Amino acid sequence: MDFSDTSEEAAYRAQVCAWLDANAPDRLPRTAPTSEQLRAAKDWQAKKAAAGYAQISWAKEWGGPGGTTMQNVIYNQEEGRRGLATGFFGIGLGMCIPTVIAFADEVTKKRFVGPALRGEEIWCQLFSEPAAGSDLAAVRTSAVPDGDDWVVNGQKIWTSGAHYSDYGIVVTRTNRDAPKHKGLTMFWVDMTSPGIEVRPINQMSGESGFNEVFFTDVRIPDGQRLGAVDNGWKVSLVTLMNERLSIGGGGGGADYARFMELARGQTVGDEPALAHSAFREKIADWYVRTEGMKHTRMRSLTALSRGETPGPESSIGKVVAALQALNVAECAIDMLDAYGIIDDPEISPMRGAFQSLFLGMPGLRIAGGTDEILRNIIAERVLGLPGEIRVDKDVAFKDLPAGR
């Protein structure tokens, strides 16, 4: 394990910092954008693409500079430290477009890769459903062949960014006689297709980043199929494996260091908050966990710098980080006493960062795999413990219990 940049990586980091200092906008929206804010994010994405800082590890054939995955990580780190990382393009460029490149025909690739890279078109991932998410193979949205088309009916949920996305990739059920992992098929879809209805979900934070998406007799040409019929599970795994490589960003959030910054001006009872034994014990715990996460992340970064692919240990970071972030937010709000309920960024300390964190963390604990799913991955694939018993593995999907 090597914690330091190599000389080449240090030189690249200096190059990135110089470019960001000269070109980065002061501020970008992270979620729930207005049309003007979304335009600003698209302009920044186009500027990055023109300078070769969008999807750095992509081949020149697809508009990238053909850089290394480690260079991509370095750029994401520096962009994240400046608060410039937005979520608008991450799903499309990190998961959807790599799946298109892997499984679509040449005409489709040439049509979509460039506009997505430049931020001209945004993509979403239509995977989760009311009865399928933690168990993605339980997807029930159906695709039935009809001439040269497929007719799609069903409902997706928790679809990030669907309300401003132009295209999406959707996994559907095409064979109910096969076991659940063997009867799925993937397509790309135009989000303006007749029969698609997007309903934003109002979150307790006041934002609406997630959506319900309803498909009613939506016709998708067979030419928009990604991969073979009934092979959608393996296509989905390629999508999810690309998600794992989207690591290395972050920074600048309301973490335990900012908690200490907030606590320096607070009192609990008659003594400064930082002198209070309960807070000191919590800060010590958070420090230890943060160091553990840093070293685990460094293990993944070292693997990337050696040209290797990080393994399932990447799941550890999300489980620990999401729980700790929620705990930090709870303690900050508790320390602020009655002022803790004020989440107005113009009034609340730290511009309401801890209130925002408290309201957003429950969603993060579900997104990208629930805590329970990730713990299963860690137990089975990192620690080598016996696998969970899966009695439905070889049962035809139509015969699985579905409730009322």
Image: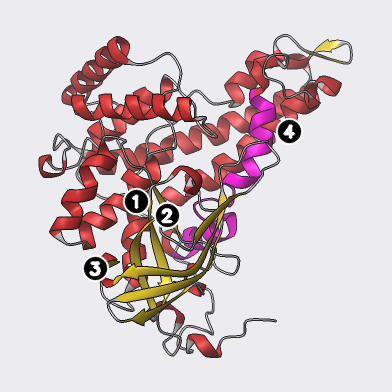
How far apart, in angstroms, are the residues tagged by discs 2 and 3? 19 Å
Nearer the observer, 340 or 203: 203
Q: Which residue is mark 2?
A: 125
Q: Is residue 299 above or below residue 349?
A: below
- The percent position of residue 380, horizontal first and vertical second, equals 46, 65
Amino acid bearing label 4 = Glu
Disc on the earlier residue, 2 or 4: 2
Colour scheme used in the picture? secondary structure
Q: Residue furthest right?
A: 269
Callout 4 crowding tier (Cα within 10 Å): few <14, some 14–19, many ≥20: some
The answer to the question of whether label 1 and label 2 lie on touching residues, with beta carbons closer than 8 A, is yes
Q: Which residue is mark 4?
A: 330
Disc on the earlier residue, 1 or 2: 1
Q: Is residue 398 above or below residue 74?
A: below
* SS assignment at label 2: strand
Disc on the earlier residue, 4 or 3: 3
Residue 245 visible (yes or no)? no
How far apart, in angstroms, are the residues tagged by discs 3 and 1? 20 Å
Q: Which residue is mark 3?
A: 223
Could you say which quadrant of the image residue 389 lies in?
bottom right
Callout 1 crowding tier (Cα within 10 Å): few <14, some 14–19, many ≥20: many
Nearer the observer, 118 or 72: 118
Q: Residue at x 37, y 35 (%)?
A: 248
Q: Which residue is mark 1?
A: 95
- The percent position of residue 161, horizontal first and vertical second, equals 48, 45
